């Protein structure tokens, strides 16, 4: 009954759970100075198992969400980190052990928790209409207090969320502050149902439409433009019978086509555009010219997730899992079977693309992403992981790259405008960098236009930060409009 | 105005401030099992600067006290760590910078904090009469909530503490639960005044007596036996004019004799026994036979504190600073000028001696201490620091030693009886071990009778623990009698 984590790579060494909640007042600035103009809070969520897993061979997608915040004011940065009190977290904390089983598999749970929400709030944390929401795509988001990180409770848009789930990658349309989002597996795990919503800037759901996907798959991210929303159906497929039999939630099916479901904004009809088999996950940005849609996303030959097996039994292929930032172009008035075209934007494999969110859904010239390799800069140590940050102009493909260090791993970067009307891509990029040799983490403040220069400031967090997923900057002005 | 710590060894690398407050529910047990019989809480205090120092060349004696707790119940251990909210800590947190100057030097402070308590509560945390008290010898202790570690406030024994200070090394007489304690510099910094107190088991001061030391010095620890209390005057001397001039609070004066001030328990008269120059700090235990007093303490030729200079200007001498556990024997009816005799108990240099506190003030057979060297086990890496734990029978000098590892540092160990009436020295030893290569800390649960065997359990704390001083075990039964 001791608290002991498995003797597996995912739970040991630099992947060992951290599990510490707490705060540091005034992070040490080890280099540079924190710009006074940065006033707001960078929130991010990590996945860190509070208790040893209930099942064998668990992975961090199935770990508890822990939200961290970095509050910038007057050149100081205060740090706080706290688990989201999901019903699942609360039940397991009370029992002092895991009770929930495999990733998104309710059939593998301890019977004592039957019917309880399986949500983990471990994928993204975003701000909309005065609320800070921690989310995972298999459940509704959980509202978190933006100052204390205490959990307020599940947020279902005042009960208007008819889907059982809500994406961890909603988009905010800068034109009117709408939250554009969806749920997949919307009628239950493995169902092909998709619910599309828009909530207005006050947080009220003003549009809802339901669709059925060509097949059940992971719809982790999606594309939103001024006039369209696009659901990418990528063949990480799910199946209820397999799930009930204790099989993996997803398998990679290299025989299936990819589909892009295109729906007019606030529309109710979908057209499915078919393309050949490939893998993509996160969207850097997307936009349209009224007829054509442009979607920028890293594209690989096969799934990037080694813990979801190939349906053929083929071993995981790191080479084919590399994603290269590419642009998909699609004629919304064209023949769905002619599909969409693809053009590679970079020769560097990477993921975690982000943009200047003020240009989200619009034609844009600035993005950042993390790279695993940069041609011409070989490391030859055979280690996987993201060790470079890149800024990129997606129109020209021009990049700047920043090497984090041989024994470092970069986490998702975010762009922060110094003032609301700063020019596109002018501002700062914030990025957490894991420092493996010192078991600590640096938060870099970079000049967005010169990410390859000396950081504007480096802040030291004296602990490892649990493996992180996504985060967002919330300005002081936004925070002043908090609700609850 | 950035938060940046000095580029000095005491603030960098494994000595870099941690500054993190927080908690971990259910520490990971990486080896063994936590005995069910361990029910209670191990409290310890570290010194960790909340802000970069106000003065140059600061050292950790002048850093903020941060109390950590390890609560044992049912084979689980919950961890929590929190700064003591001294008036000084609160003022500096509000200002987001240090305002208090050099170690125990009010003349070096920012004028905005004139008159505010300079206490840091960074030396010991102990339990008496239902209260948990964090203490430093230059001020009264601060009461801390035993569950939350929130600060209750300064504790002056309901105003009965007439001294300006109270030792961080009070003793509890197991016969009746009395707290036997004193203050030195009792009428203000560098004064030679000593106030001796006893508080009964309800926490009420029932005895007070005042004495004047032969000269002003650090009286960090002292000896208490059934019939006597003994004040060791060791020539780390203080001087008000030097302090006002910005000089060090203490200097080592190798020309001065050592004195032991012997006072009958609850008596009012002192006899000063004179001995030759030497250094000692912590007392493992002391006892008497009605006439003779026996005091066990590590004794060195010179001060062990490199940050207090030699009065002659001689550089710090690591060789001469080594302390060897020794027994001082003193005939309370003898000639004070004949002084006391000394016999070395071990050939291993060390410090942080502790005993089975149920035998405190009585003849005893069990102690533990940390060693820097063990003859015959040379490491030849030239690194300083405590890397061995030893258990010792002070009557025979027999020792067992445990090597913590080349890249490890052991912190003060404590003995815990599994049940109140367990035989002397039968039980567990708890010890924090800093693991430098992983920037983490292990809490070892050792069999007190076989500290050289495989630990009973090893718990992993995934952060560095700030440089620690003293701590104590508080049983579940004691905690049930908490006040406030």
Image (spheres, coloured by chain):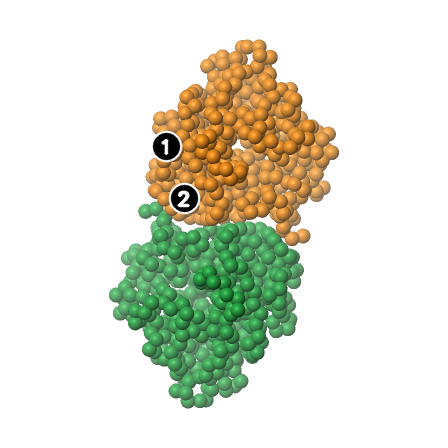
Chain colours: A orange, B green
The residue closer to the viewer here, A445 or A480, is A445
Counting from the top left corner in percent of width and height, residue B370 is at 51, 67
Q: In this picture, is A266 found above or below B313?
A: above
Which residue corresponds to the image point at 54% horizontal and 45% vertical from the top-left? A14
Q: Is residue A68 visible?
A: yes
Q: Estimate how packed mark 2 is, as few (under 14), some (14 to 19) or many (20 or more) residues with alpha carbons within 10 Å.
A: many
Counting from the top left corner in percent of width and height, residue A377 is at 45, 34
Q: Which residue is mark 2?
A: A459
The residue closer to the viewer here, B1 or B437, is B437
Q: Is residue B188 visible?
A: no
Q: Badge 1 sits on which subunit?
A: A
Q: Quadrant of residue B276?
A: bottom left
Which residue corresponds to the image point at 70% horizontal and 42% vertical from the top-left? A110
Q: In this picture, is A248 found above or below B478?
A: above
Q: Which residue is mark 1?
A: A450
Q: In this picture, is B351 found above or below A358?
A: below
Which residue corresponds to the image point at 49% horizontal and 12% vertical from the top-left? A291
Callout 1: SS: helix
The residue closer to the viewer here, A234 or B260, is A234
Q: Quadrant of residue B280?
A: bottom left
Which of disc 1 and disc 2 is earlier in sequence?
1
Comparing labels 2 and 1, the label whose residue is closer to the camera: 1
From the viewer's perspective, tell me whether residue A248 is left or right of residue A128.
Answer: right
Q: CA distance from mark 2 to mark 1?
A: 18 Å
Q: Badge 2 sits on which subunit?
A: A
Q: Quadrant of residue B138?
A: bottom left
Counting from the top left corner in percent of width and height, residue B260 is at 42, 80
Q: How many marks?
A: 2
Which residue corresponds to the image point at 58% horizontal and 60% vertical from the top-left? B444
């Amino acid at each position: 009954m001791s608290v002991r984590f498995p003797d597996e790579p995912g739970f040991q060494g630099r992947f060992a759970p951290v599990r510490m909640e707490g705060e540091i007042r005034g992070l040490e600035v080890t280099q540079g100075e924190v710009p006074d103009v940065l006033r707001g809070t960078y929130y991010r969520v990590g996945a860190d198992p509070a208790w040893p897993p209930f099942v064998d061979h668990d992975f961090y997608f199935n770990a508890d969400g822990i939200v961290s915040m970095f509050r910038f004011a007057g050149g100081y940065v205060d740090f706080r980190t706290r688990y989201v009190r999901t019903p699942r977290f609360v039940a397991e904390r009370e029992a002092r052990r895991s009770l929930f089983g495999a990733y998104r598999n309710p059939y593998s749970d301890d019977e004592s928790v039957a019917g309880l929400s399986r949500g983990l709030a471990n994928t993204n944390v975003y701000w909309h209409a005065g609320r800070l929401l921690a989310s995972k795509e298999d459940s509704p988001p959980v509202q978190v207090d933006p100052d204390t990180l205490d959990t307020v409770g599940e947020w279902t848009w005042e009960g208007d969320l008819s889907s059982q789930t809500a994406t961890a990658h909603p988009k905010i349309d800068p034109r009117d502050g709408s939250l554009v989002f969806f749920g997949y597996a919307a009628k239950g795990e493995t169902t092909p149902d998709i619910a599309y919503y828009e909530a207005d800037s006050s947080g009220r759901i003003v549009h809802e439409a339901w669709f059925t996907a060509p097949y059940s798959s992971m719809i982790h991210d999606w594309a939103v433009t001024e006039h369209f929303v696009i659901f990418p159906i990528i063949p990480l497929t799910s199946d209820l019978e397999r799930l009930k039999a204790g099989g993996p939630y997803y398998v990679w099916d290299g025989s299936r086509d990819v589909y892009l479901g295109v729906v007019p904004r606030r529309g109710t009809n979908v057209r499915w555009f078919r393309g050949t088999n490939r893998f993509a996950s996160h969207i850097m940005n997307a936009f349209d010219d009224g007829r054509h849609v442009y979607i920028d996303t890293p594209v690989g030959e096969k799934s990037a997730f080694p813990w979801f097996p190939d349906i053929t039994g083929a071993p995981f292929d790191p080479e084919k899992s590399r994603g290269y930032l590419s642009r998909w172009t699609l004629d919304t008035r064209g023949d769905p079977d002619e599909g969409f075209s693809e053009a590679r934007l970079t020769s560097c494999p990477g993921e975690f693309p982000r943009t200047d969110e003020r240009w989200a859904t619009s034609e844009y010239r600035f993005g950042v992403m993390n790279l695993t390799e940069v041609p011409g800069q070989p490391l030859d140590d055979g280690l996987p992981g993201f060790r470079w940050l890149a800024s990129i102009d997606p129109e020209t493909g021009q990049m700047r790259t920043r090497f984090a260090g041989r024994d470092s791993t970069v986490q998702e970067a975010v762009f922060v405008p110094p003032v609301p009307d700063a020019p596109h891509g002018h501002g700062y990029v914030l990025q957490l960098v894991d420092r493996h040799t010192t078991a600590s983490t640096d938060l870099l403040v970079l000049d967005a236009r010169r990410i390859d220069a000396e950081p504007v400031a480096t802040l030291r967090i004296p602990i490892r930060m649990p493996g992180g997923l996504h985060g967002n900057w919330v300005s002081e002005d936004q925070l002043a409009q908090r609700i609850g």
